[in-house]
Image (spheres, grey):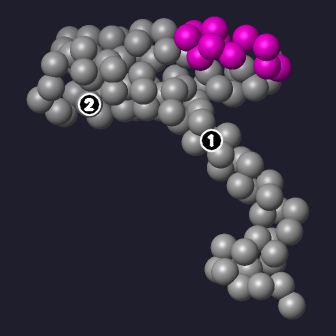
Amino acid sequence: MENSTKEVFRSCFWWAFFIGVITMLIRPFISIRQTIRDTAITFLVSMLSGLLAEYLNIPEAVKYGLSGVCGLFAVRLYIIGENLLCQTARNPVGWFKRILGKKDD
């Protein structure tokens, strides 16, 4: 890899690591399993969005900000998706009827 590519990867890695640590500090009283899950989600999404932001012609601070926000927002989206799938698993037919607006017979 080129030196500039390594530099970009290294900076995105450390920023994503920092955002992952912030995630652990924001929610200190959850289980270890959830903490590791949230940190992993935050790290991966922050890292990927930081690497994708390198293609944009915007200042570095904005790139880091977007990367951090995407990482922290990804945890919330994961929790919403998980709850939605749990509700669907409990009563799939009723859930689809409710979404489509049909009344139960």
For residue 97, which quarter of the picture? bottom right
Q: Which residue is drawn at 67% across and 40% down?
A: 79
Residue 78, position as x, y percentages in the image: 62, 41
Magenta span has 27?
A: yes
Q: Is residue 67 above or below residue 16?
A: below
Residue 40, position as x, y percentages in the image: 61, 25
Q: How crowded is mark 1: few (under 14 residues within 10 Å), some or many (20 or more)?
A: some
Question: Which residues fall within the magenta stretch?
Answer: 21-31
Q: Is residue 92 above or below residue 39?
A: below
Residue 22, position as x, y percentages in the image: 55, 11
Q: Is residue 66 above or below residue 95?
A: above
Quarter of the picture containing the C terminus is: bottom right
Q: Is residue 94 left or right of residue 51?
A: right
Of badges 2 and 1, the one in the foreground is: 1
Q: Which is nearer the eye, 30 or 35?
A: 30
Residue 37, position as x, y percentages in the image: 69, 27
Element type at marker 1? helix
Q: Which of marks 2 and 1 is nearer the N terminus?
A: 2
Q: Residue 78 carries which label?
A: 1
Q: Residue at x 65, y 49 (%)?
A: 81
Magenta span has 41?
A: no
| Residue 1 can be seen, yes or no | no
